[in-house]
Image (tube, grey):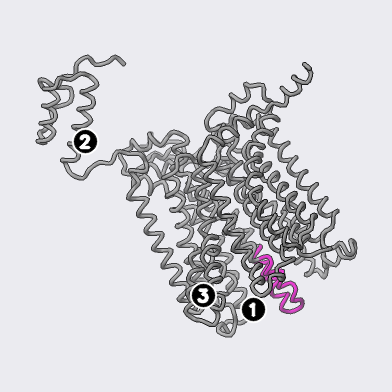
Amino acid sequence: MSRISRFLKHLDLPLLGKELIEQAARKRTYAIRVVYATILFLMTTLFFYEVLSVASASPLAVLGRGKDMVSILVGVQFAGVYLFMPAMTCGVLTQEKERASLQLLFLTRLGPWAILFEKLLGRLVPMLGFLLLSLPLLAFAYTLGGVTQKMLWTGVWMLTLAAIEMGSLAILCSAFCRTTVGSFMATYVLAFLMFFGPYFLFMILMIVGMLLDIRPDQFLEGVFGAGSQGVFFMALFPFFGPPIFFADTLLPGVMGHVALAVHSVLILGVSGGFLLLARRFLVTRAFLPQNNVLLRAFKSFDSPRRARAAVPAVTTGRAVVCTDDALLPANEPIVWRETSKRMLGNWRYIFRVLLFIEIPTILFCGLLVWVEVYSRQYNNMAGEIVMMLSFPMLFLMWMLAVLVVSVKSASLIAGERSHQTLDVLTTTPLTGREIVLQKMRGVRRIIAVTAVPFSTVFLFKAWRLATIHGLNDWRERDFNPRVYLVGQALAMAILLPLVAWLSLLIGLKVRTQGRAIMGAMAAIVAWCVAPLIFIVIPLSILFPHFGTDRPFEAMIELASLLSPATAVFMNEFGALKEFKIGPWVTIVVNFVMYGALLFWIRRVCLTNADRWLGRLEGGDTAVEKGLSLRRLRSWLNGLTGTSSEGAEAIEERTETGEEQEAPGKLAEGEAIRDLPAV
């Protein structure tokens, strides 16, 4: 009996229990579950409407349509896992580092593996709970028929694999990074590289092979025969579950049991590798000082010259030559504080960062131009591959840019609160407006750096298509370089600052850094997706024949512009000409609306900066200032026992606005007696 009790004692999971109890004690946990369930059921109901609409003609026509409904439902759940699982998990260890409580965990009997697994399970359990919310919808789809047990269990298994994969990656980044912001950004960037890196690499190999008269797809077909399509999908997305699931569901025979087993082994193997690396970094990187590796690498190139420049010329009477680090702030101390220890703080380093980003971008665009010319002369399939490369590249560039700008902006004020430095910052003789504007200066530099590769891609695409098709036939073609360049330039100039100020607004209102980042990302995703799902789709359902009614069609088109992603990606496809109001009017309406919204959000942040920063709101008149001072002195006199006569004298002098005596002198009756010892 004693052996059984000892065995059960070893199975105790105290850290997991603590995590789950804390989550269960928060009202936010249940609110998030209700919101998630509401959004899930509303989205699937709207998506199911088109599938179930055939029942209006014949009730039996809906039988066998459960397969489409399950595919939609699993796709929505995949999106939830990939978007929110990293955000839920990336701060489990960095928050312990920031609170200086990780060393307390090391003092317990828990080993590193126990800490990692219990932290991971503490986030997997809530995510699996979110996935279980879809069981009623799955049951309803299963009753309609067309759903095999293999398809159902494949969806459940692949969703579980996706949650384990993203949780393990986030745990690795949390163990490696020092801050929650760094872990958050590293998790999503590595996820993008894992999911879409093999796709871009294989497409580039396809292009190079075509230029050399080699076809990798034909090579795969010759080696693997009938299973070459499954191998092709595995080569494109080895670590990304949705393409594998949809290929197996919608294209029977493409993916077999062996392909699914190989994919599962890859995901579990990669997750195990992430946990091994996290185990190594958990102890070695537990107590890291603040250090910017890239900034230190940039400074290493300047060390000889900077050492010579640091020698003062005091003997000759000349001005002392100082290095960048020796320069003190002149008029903008917060700008100096925000930029002096970062890569984007010095224009020399900004130029190097731009070169690091711009040179690969130019080379990639040059390759696309070369392939486009080749495809027009010899092989049209190469042009299709160019389209399959250019649009996903721009999509990922937008996602990374929005991620960086949003995370940086949301953590400006929330990070100061988490590091307990906001109180010191608010004691400076600066207004809240000045503090916010100076904090945003670094974000403006990030947006400027981000705009350079975007401009390169836009200019290359406009030049490539205009040159190949001819410069004088814009009206006869789908692509108009003028519309394209103006639309994308306005998107960079308005939407990225709008993302920055919206994230700052959330960071001003939210207490902790992790919540601010998650709230900003959730708001941006909801803003891009919610209007299309909850406004455009219901309008299309209410007016199914809007194509024959011009006013209703224009109304639905304008409703689609409520999503900021609509104009950007329709412009990329050259589809703005399909709007009935015309491409130029669409651009003007879209960006005037978002420009006005940017102005309003910026004004709200600056107007309420003092209040949201936690400062006392001073009145504009002398009477209000005197009233606040009188209340403060009355409260202090009540604590220290000042006589009522002295208090009344102070109040009378404050109300009449008489000049106060010099510091150190107290009038009769104003002495504060019995001061408590400090």
Q: Answer left or right for 33 relative to 237.
A: left
Q: Position of residue 464 (x, y in %)?
A: 62, 73
Question: Earlier along the polypeptide chain: callout 1 or callout 3?
Answer: 1
Asked if the residues shown at circle 2 and circle 3 are in contact, with their CB atoms under 8 angstroms apart, the answer is: no
Secondary structure found at label 3: helix
Residue 24 in magenta stretch:
no
Q: What stretch is highlighted in magenta?
A: 364-389
Secondary structure found at label 2: helix
At x 58% / y 45%, what residue is drawn? 87
For residue 22, above or below residue 49: above
At x 48% / y 76%, what residue is drawn? 554
Q: Which residue matches tag 3? A: 483
Question: Which amino acid is tagged 1?
Answer: Ile
Q: In which quarter of the image is residue 22?
A: top right
Within 10 Å of disc 1 (Cα), the crowding (few <14, some 14-19, many 20+) is: few
Q: Nearer the viewer, residue 490 or 195?
A: 195
Question: Which amino acid is tagged 3?
Answer: Val
Q: Which residue matches tag 1? A: 468
Question: Which amino acid is tagged 2?
Answer: Ser
Q: Give residue 628's mark.
A: 2
Q: Position of residue 122 (x, y in %)?
A: 63, 36
